Image (spheres, rainbow, N blue to C red):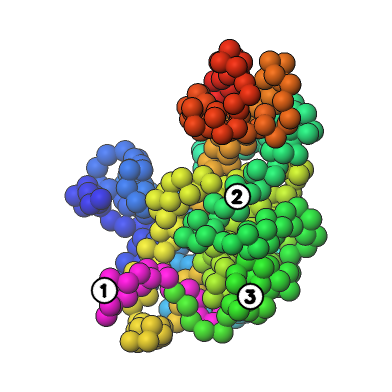
Amino acid sequence: MKTLLPPGAQAIGYKALVDKYDLKVVPHHRWSYIVPKGARKVLDDQVPALYLYDIGYALENSHDFEHLAFALKHEGLNLDIINCFFKLVSQDDVANYIRQQPSGKYHRMMWYLYESLTNQILDIPGLVNGSYVNLLDSGDYYTCEPVAKKRQRINDNLLGNITGLCPFVRKTECLQKAEATQLDRVAREIVESYDPRILERASTFLYTHETMSSYEIERERPDKKRLTRFIDLVKKAETTAQLTHETLFQLQGSVVEERFAQYAYRTTQNFVGHVTDWRRQNVDYISPCPEAVIPMMNDLLDSLQRMLESNVHPIVMAAAISFAFVYIHPFDDGNGRLHRFLIHYILHTTRFSPKGMIFPISAVILADMQRYYKVLETFSQPLMECITGYEISDDGILTVEQETTYLYRFVDYTAHAEFLANCIEQTIATDFKKELEYLTRYDAAKQAISQIVDMPDHLLDLFIVLVTQNNGALSSKKRQQHFAMLTDDEVEKMEAVVRDMM
């Protein structure tokens, strides 16, 4: 979509810094402009959204740090842009700006961010009094329990590690609605309203459905042995006490063919692409360089622990951790299935999923793969616009010739969390609830049929299956093969029972 800005619009905040220094970054979720005429306005049909401010917001001094202060005040926190900007300005310039008002809220935030991101200490004495300031506004972002930073009197309430990997999720209307709906309570109430024997059978179906769908997403058809192994793996999501590197190694070995099991993180550069003809392969996504994998996975597990201890909303946590994992792509194979395992692990660990049950999220994904790809592309497409220095050999070996690690550190996972919330809501209304309802109707149908003809249990099941498959009627061929002993009247009454169940 072409961006149509009013005449005379001037970039302010993050956009001004990105344009001035030609920063190679994934765009912020919004750009801001000062317009000479008109009132404040938001163009949220654009990507990124455009925020137009009237002339009263114009900066008296169009200094770089004033643009950064505007961004921190009005646009939220974008560590990717700030990190790249700090690499291009002198330490003295940063210190001089902060000295002008060292106790000011946004000056303190810049001070903490600069020292944390660059690992350089400014020649400014630490503050000795004053209240602490939250780094993230908890009204706009999901946050962790704050860690007090005495020097700048800042509360670091990020979801991750500012010096390593730090995901962001904004409190959008969609996510706040999902919170208010209390999907975990809805699912629990559904489960509690059914007979335990029905729940046990539904659980078996849902685990199998999730497993088959997860493999189909990867365009694979597992044999019975691999299918059983993956079902067992998904069930481990409920019993795995703590996620560690060793746990992930074992899990990876379980989801791939034995000869491709690694039991270690990758040591080569991998990517996602598609072949256009026998000579060329298009690159759709490049993962971090192999040297960055172990540090990023350390940070990922640390972030998970921090979020768990802070009781971050399970959907937010599951989205941030699982999609960060798939973007890191730490293994040569099995990343997609482990990505979905992590979702279930977090939902079970936080007791969001009912005990003994699973939300068949993969089935929802499989039903609308384009929506899933679109969510992945919210990061992969702008990322690939930043990565231009790479080559792929005739043997399919990709070499990246530029520094890219910073691009994966501070990703906004808001769209991913909204997607996951929608998937969970769909599973509760479709696979989850419908399977329980179906099994209840099925048992009632068996009971009603047994009142017509007292047949062996396996014949009752077969009759229902055959009639269901044939749109409510038993075919002449199947009747002759399996139910020749029944009268026309009996078959007619039994078919009517099955039709009522369907």
**On the image, which quarter does residue 81 sit in?**
bottom left
Label 3 vs label 2: CA separation? 22 Å
Residue 358 magenta: no
Badge 3, how many Cα within 10 Å: few under 14, some, many 20+? few
Closer mark to the observer between disc 3 and disc 2: 3
Label 2 vs label 1: CA separation? 34 Å
Three-letter amino acid code at the position of disc 2: Glu
* Mark 3 element type: helix
Q: Is residue 28 left or right of residue 306?
A: left
Three-letter amino acid code at the position of disc 3: Glu
The label number, if any, that marks residue 210 in the structure image? 2
Which region is colored magenta?
272-300
The label number, if any, that marks residue 258 in the structure image? 3
Q: Is residue 401 above or below residue 227?
A: below
Q: Which residue is mark 1?
A: 277
Mark 3 or mark 2: whose residue is earlier in sequence: 2
